[in-house]
Image: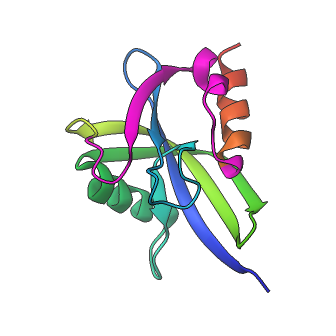
Amino acid sequence: MKKTVHVVGAIIENEKNEIFCALRSPEMDLANHWEFPGGKIEIGETPEQALKREIQEEFACTIQVGAKVEDTTYEYERVIVRLETYKAQLEEGQPNALEHAATKWVTRDKLTQLNFAPADVPAVVKITNEAK
C-alpha cells in the first residue's frame, strides 16, 4: 500500500496579479517541475499554519493565507499526494528560494506554459479560468 502524504501549496499573488511559482530542484522528487510552494502538514497543524511555516522555512518571508482554491489527490508512482492549495498574500519580505532551483512571478494566462507537477495542475486550471 502506498503512503499518502498531505501537503499544502500557496498561490501567492502580488499587486501586479502575478502568481509566485517555484521550480523543484534536481535533488527533489518531481525534479524540474514547477509548483505552488508549500509542504507537508505536521501533526497538530492546520493547513494554514503549515503553509505559513513552510513558506517561512523555504522562502524566508511571511504570508497571509486566504481562501482554499483546490483539494486534489494524485497518485504518483511511489506515493499518493493530497494537495490543498490556498490563495495567499505576502505579509513581510520577498520570497527568497532556499531549496528550489528557481522561482518566478507569472501572470495567470502564462501559468499553463510551465511544466507543473501533476497534483498542482487542477489548481492551475482553476485559477487560470478565474481570469477569464
The C terminus is located in which quarter? top right
Measured as percent of width and height from the top left, residue 7 is found at 56, 64
Which residues are the magenta region? Answer: 96-119
Asked if residue 85 lies in the magenta stretch, the reply is no
Q: Nearer the viewer, residue 56 or 34?
A: 34
Q: Nearer the viewer, residue 24 or 110?
A: 24
Asked if residue 99 lies in the magenta stretch, the reply is yes
- Asked if 40 appears above or below 95 in the picture, the reply is below
Visual colour scheme: rainbow
Q: Residue at x 71, y 73 (%)?
A: 78
Q: Residue furthest bottom?
A: 1
Decide if residue 10 is on the left or right side of residue 53: right
- Asked if 35 appears above or below 19 in the picture, the reply is below
Quarter where residue 51 is shown: bottom left
Decide if residue 126 is on the left or right side of residue 49: right
Quarter where residue 82 is shown: bottom right
Q: Residue at x 23, y 50 (%)?
A: 60
Q: Residue at x 46, y 18 (%)?
A: 17
Q: Residue furthest front?
A: 26
